[in-house]
Each structure stands twice: as structure tokens, then as C-alpha cells.
Image (tube, rainbow, N blue to C red):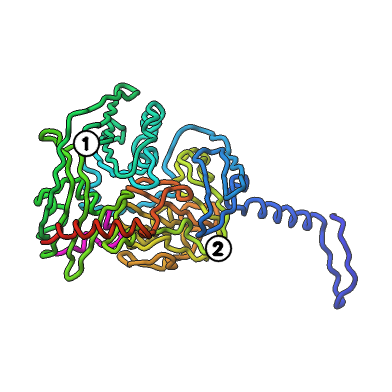
């Protein structure tokens, strides 16, 4: 018979507790303490939320994190297998596409781009989901591509798998550098045929949709894409209706009968009684006629207070649920159940429902290029179709779906590609000032006169 501990009489009763009972309770407490931790503490860091701190996180399983002036090592477990399977954070519901999404995914896969302030070739191509190995091959072999200048035009063509086939860099009207894929490398050539610049004015009226009617008026798919990206924060192109009008003023460079480059100088869309303008400035960005920014700023984090990043963006993360290598297309914040989740920017809720392993899931479209996703929520506070503003409370964090503990899984997609939300280049809402603003206003006067209907 087990030895018992006798306590003094309390209320004429004896309390007898066997030693093995105390030991069992201690074991249970220790196991709960160890197992309750939802994710691996060796791969965590603390970051300030909604601040301008410079945070750099690499996408490798074992990396260093730089937060302001400090560095934190992130140590990832060694994968048990190289087999990649579906992530546990993949919702069952796809976001419905419209004709503007189809426009961005047309089979010609050719993109034209005007260099603006802060652009690097690596960032530009990565933003458009070009194969990373091709980007490294091109930029590594041709160091001169680091000398892109504001206002210059570049264009590139990819196949359906995002492999880079060719890249064109227009330095001047008679100096075009061509880089074409040959095997696993790129071959450079120069096109010196004098180009002819033509200023073109195109107007039209909405009868069916902006994309269809803009094409009928003579705008190319690439020019339509530039217009929709320039005004994506001011105007929902899906809500244009019959009778609305548009006017575009462009500079087109022709080499013979071939359109080499096109630059949108200004555009005006009339939606009902309201006019929307986008004008090109010397820095390669578009502003309204008052030199105010057309961009929207984003919060870096979807929470109001400091939180622990328990699992970073990693396309080859060791999944803590399945134990095998799976893509982790977002960032996990280890927050307690019921923590308010905020929208990082203005946008439209496109999905708000329970969706498979993602649990309670919200997806918000911001303009035409950006989408954010919030998963494993305890409660959803918004509905599909609802317009939300930056900082609005959209849900409460939880542990729904396939999850190892209470946390928020947050994703950022740019041009339909998941990117690291802690390091991705985000738009900045800054207008022009000083001499730059004065020069811009003078330019607007001449361009605006070309945008009459």
C-alpha cells in the first residue's frame, strides 16, 4: 500500500494524498507547458507593428533577421523530405477573376514598364512573377542593367510558366538593348535603327466594358494595363457604366511598322459627373492634376500591438502539422485567441467564410495589383462585397482550420503572386512638393488640353 502524507486536522477531517498523485500532476503540467506552445520558439522574433522599422527576412529555413539595428538568427529544422505538398494554409475557395485579371494574364505575356524612382530590375521582374533563376542569370551577367534611369522604358516577354524569353531596354530612341534567352543564358544585341516618336490622342465611350471599349478605340493591352494600375486606388473600373468616357494621351515609339514602346503621358476617365486624372511626372510615377499621389499606403502588419512572428514566409518550410516540406506563403503571428485583426489597407472584401484548412478566412482586394489574406480566425466581422478602410477591424484571431495553436496567418499577394509581407516593396502615398510640383503643374496644363472628349 502506498505511503500516505497526513496533514493536520482541519475541520475534523484528514487529508491523505499519495506521492504518485503529486508526481502525476507534475508530469501533466510539464507536458501541457511544452506541447501548448503552438509553434517552434527557435524560429521566432518580435517585431514592432505598423511602424516604419526596416525589417529584412530571407526566405531560407535558416537565416538572420535584421530589425532596425539588431539581428536575430532564425534557425529552421532540417527538412525530413524534399517532397513538397499543399500547405495547411491553403483555402478551398478561389478568388473570382474578372476581365482585368484576364488582361494581366493574356497569352502574349509581354509587359512594358516605365522606370520610376526606387526601382531596380530585380524588384520589377520579381514583382511580375518572372522566374527567379532567369532574373539572377540576367542581372548577374549584365551588370549594366543596374544603371536603369527614371523614365526609361523596359519590356519583357515570358512563356506561360513565367520563364523569361527576352528583355528589351530602351536607353534612347536609337539605342535599344535586347537580351534574348539562349539555352540557360542570355545573349545581348543592340538595335540602333532610329525610332519615330508619335504623340497619340485616343478617346472612347463605355458601351460594354472599359477593356473591350478601350481596345476598340485603339489602346493596346499593355496601355490598358498601365491605365488601370495608375488609377487603381481612385476608381473601380468594374463600376464604369454605359455613357462614361475616357481619353488617353500617349507617346508611342515606332520602329518601322512595329510599336517598340509606349508611354502614357496622361489619362482622364469620366464616371458619371466625376473626372479622374492620372498624369506622368518626371520621377516616372503618376499623380492627379494637383500633384497628389494616386497610390495608397499600407500597414506592414495587420495587428495593433507588438506580436511574435512564429513562422516566416518560406516556400519550403517544414510544416509543423504534417512534418513534411510545404510552402508557407505568409507570416504567422503568435497571438492569443480573440486578438483584433486589422485590414492593412483600403479595399473590398472578396471572401469571408470558413474555407477548409485555412479555417475562418478573409481575402481583401486592394486596387488591381494587391490582395491580402487572413486565416485561422476565431470570428469574421465583415461580409463579401463590403468596402473596408485601412485599420478597420475585420476579424478576431483564433485557431480554426488546420492549426497547431492560436495564431494569425497573414498573406500578401502582388500581381497574383504570394510575397513576403515583411519585406515586400509597398506603395508610398507621397505627393510632389517644391520645384517638382511646380514643374509638374506646368506640364499638366499642356497635357490636360489633349484630354477633351
The local secondary structure at tag 1 comes to: loop
Q: Report if residue 133 is visible in the image.
A: no
Mark 1 neighbour density, 10 Å: few (under 14) some (14–19) many (20 or more)? some
Rendered residue at 54%/45% (across/down): 320
Rendered residue at 62%/45% (across/down): 42
Between residues 310 and 66, which one lies in front from this camera angle?
A: 66
Rendered residue at 9%/60% (across/down): 207
261 versus 302 height, above or below: above
Disc 1 versus disc 2: nearer the observer: 1
The magenta stretch is 230-241
Q: Report if residue 396 is visible in the image.
A: yes
x, y percent for residue 355:
38, 56
Indicate left or right for 51 with 234 as reference: right
Q: Residue furthest top?
A: 183
Q: CB of mark 1 within 8 Å of CB of mark 2?
A: no
Q: Residue furthest right?
A: 8
Write down the residue under mark 1: 173
Q: Quadrant of the C terminus?
A: bottom left
Q: Residue furthest bottom?
A: 11
x, y percent for residue 222:
21, 45
In magenta stretch: residue 232: yes
Write down the residue under mark 2: 305
Q: Quadrant of the N terminus?
A: bottom right
Amino acid at each position: 500500500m502506498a505511503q500516505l502524507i497526513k496533514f493536520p486536522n482541519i475541520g475534523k477531517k484528514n487529508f491523505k494524498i499519495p506521492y504518485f498523485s503529486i508526481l502525476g500532476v507534475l508530469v501533466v503540467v510539464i507536458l501541457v507547458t511544452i506541447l501548448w506552445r503552438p509553434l517552434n520558439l527557435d524560429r521566432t522574433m518580435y517585431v514592432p507593428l505598423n511602424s516604419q522599422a526596416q525589417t529584412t527576412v530571407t526566405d531560407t529555413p535558416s537565416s538572420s533577421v535584421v530589425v532596425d539595428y539588431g539581428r536575430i538568427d532564425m534557425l529552421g529544422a532540417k527538412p525530413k523530405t524534399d517532397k513538397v505538398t499543399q500547405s495547411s494554409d491553403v483555402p478551398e475557395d478561389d478568388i473570382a477573376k474578372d476581365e482585368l485579371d484576364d488582361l494581366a494574364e493574356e497569352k502574349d505575356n509581354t509587359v512594358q514598364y516605365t522606370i520610376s524612382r526606387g526601382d531596380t530590375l530585380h524588384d520589377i521582374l520579381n514583382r511580375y512573377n518572372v522566374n527567379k533563376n532567369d532574373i539572377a542569370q540576367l542581372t548577374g551577367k549584365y551588370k549594366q542593367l543596374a544603371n536603369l534611369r527614371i523614365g526609361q522604358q523596359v519590356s519583357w516577354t515570358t512563356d506561360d510558366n513565367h520563364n523569361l524569353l527576352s528583355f528589351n531596354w530602351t536607353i534612347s530612341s536609337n539605342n535599344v538593348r535586347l537580351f534574348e534567352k539562349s539555352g540557360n543564358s542570355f545573349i545581348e544585341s543592340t538595335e540602333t535603327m532610329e525610332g519615330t516618336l508619335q504623340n497619340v490622342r485616343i478617346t472612347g465611350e463605355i458601351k460594354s466594358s472599359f477593356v473591350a471599349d478601350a481596345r476598340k478605340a485603339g489602346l493596346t493591352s499593355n496601355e490598358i494595363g498601365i491605365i488601370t494600375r495608375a488609377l487603381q486606388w481612385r476608381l473601380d473600373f468594374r463600376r464604369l457604366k454605359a455613357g462614361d468616357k475616357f481619353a488617353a494621351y500617349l507617346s508611342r515609339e515606332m520602329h518601322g511598322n512595329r510599336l517598340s514602346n509606349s508611354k502614357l503621358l496622361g489619362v482622364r476617365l469620366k464616371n458619371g459627373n466625376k473626372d479622374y486624372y492620372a498624369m506622368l511626372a518626371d520621377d516616372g510615377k503618376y499623380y492627379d492634376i494637383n500633384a497628389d499621389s494616386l497610390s495608397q499606403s499600407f500597414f506592414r502588419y495587420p495587428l495593433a500591438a507588438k506580436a511574435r512572428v512564429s513562422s516566416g514566409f518560406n516556400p519550403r518550410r517544414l510544416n509543423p502539422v504534417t512534418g513534411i516540406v510545404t510552402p508557407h506563403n505568409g507570416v504567422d503571428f503568435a497571438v492569443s485567441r480573440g486578438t483584433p485583426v486589422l485590414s492593412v489597407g483600403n479595399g473590398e472584401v472578396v471572401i469571408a467564410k470558413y474555407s477548409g484548412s485555412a479555417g475562418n478566412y478573409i481575402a481583401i482586394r486592394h486596387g488591381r495589383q494587391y490582395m491580402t489574406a487572413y486565416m485561422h480566425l476565431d470570428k469574421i466581422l465583415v461580409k463579401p462585397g463590403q468596402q473596408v478602410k485601412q485599420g478597420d477591424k475585420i476579424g478576431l484571431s483564433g485557431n480554426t482550420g488546420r492549426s497547431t495553436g492560436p495564431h494569425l496567418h497573414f498573406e500578401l499577394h502582388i500581381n497574383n503572386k504570394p510575397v513576403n509581407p515583411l519585406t515586400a516593396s509597398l506603395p508610398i502615398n507621397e505627393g510632389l512638393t517644391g520645384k517638382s510640383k511646380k514643374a509638374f503643374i506646368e506640364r499638366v496644363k499642356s497635357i490636360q488640353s489633349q484630354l477633351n472628349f
